[in-house]
Image (tube, rainbow, N blue to C red):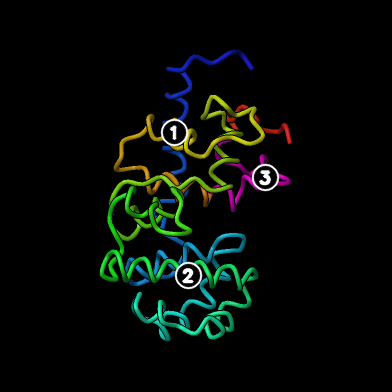
Amino acid sequence: MVRESKRARQARMHDEYAILREVFPAPECALHFSNPLQLLIATVLSAQTTDRRVNTVTPELFARFPEAADLAAANPQEVEDIIHPLGFYRSKTKHLLGLAVALDERFGGEVPRTMKELTSLPGVGRKTANVVLGNAFGIPGFPVDTHVMRVTGRLRWRSDWRDAHPDPVAVEREITACFPPGEWTDLSHRLILFGRATCHARRPDCVECPLAATCPAAGAA
């Protein structure tokens, strides 16, 4: 591929994103929730498992422990029994209880609305905080998960695409610099949906890919 200027790359990014907007016109968070606390808990649980599987255990968990104080005072064994199907249930229970205690003691049981406060909570990193900010509060956030890493790398949307272990914070900063904040949350959703539907990890479906005409990696896998 001929070396692409930064201006040309950004123009291509916007053209490709316009196509993704058409393919995924109404993206939504895959985790089921009805309030910020539920989304925070579900996102923490989603580590090393699928959103679909998380959605199978959270209805009982949310019903049993509707407030942060309820979860903070929970019997760990009871929580473990509920989330056991997700795997890593002991460590996840420990994380949830620690998170609930911090929310109850430091924030009156309410989920904070800033990146700094969210990431001060045990077990909450930037990805989780961005999920909560964007989907629970409508505050621009760009969660960088494995799908976002893979897709932005294959599309050469980021300068470190050759790096086998890119820095998620650097990826977040570089990609969000190219799009208005109002698009960040849906941009992440669309990249994730595209990664799940077409740009698979082991064998991307380049034949059916709507971005194949301009993707630098089309047909290379």
Which of label 3 and label 2 is nearer to you?
2
Q: Which mark is residue 143?
A: none
Q: Residue furthest front?
A: 105
Q: Read off the residue under disc 2.
A: 96
Q: Could you classify mark 2 by the number of other residues whose Cα lies within 10 Å: few (under 14), some (14-19), or many (20 or more)?
A: many
Which residue appears at 40% of the width and 58% of the height?
121
Q: Earlier in the sequence, mark 3 or mark 2?
A: 2
Instruction: First in sequence, mark 1 or 2: give its number.
Output: 2
In percent of width and height, residue 195 lies at 58, 48
Q: Quadrant of residue 124?
A: bottom left
For label 3, the residue is 205
* Residue placed most toward the observer, 166 or 221: 166
- Could you tell whether 74 is left or right of 164 in the image? left
> Residue 110: x percent and y percent?
28, 67
- Whether residues under marks 3 and 2 lie with C-beta atoms below 8 angstroms apart, the answer is no
Q: SS of the residue at dot 1?
A: helix
Quarter the C terminus occupies: top right
Amino acid type, mark 3: Asp
Residue at the image point whose x is 34% and y is 72% from the top = 34
Q: For residue 100: magenta?
A: no
Q: Which residue is mark 1?
A: 175
Disc 3 to disc 1, C-alpha distance: 24 Å
- Vertical order, 111 against 203 (above or below): below
Q: Secondary structure at mark 3?
A: loop
Residue 206 quadrant:
top right
Helix, strand or loop under label 2: helix
Q: Amino acid at mark 2?
A: Leu
How far apart are labels 3 and 2 at the CA level? 37 Å
Q: Nearer the viewer, residue 189 or 132?
A: 132
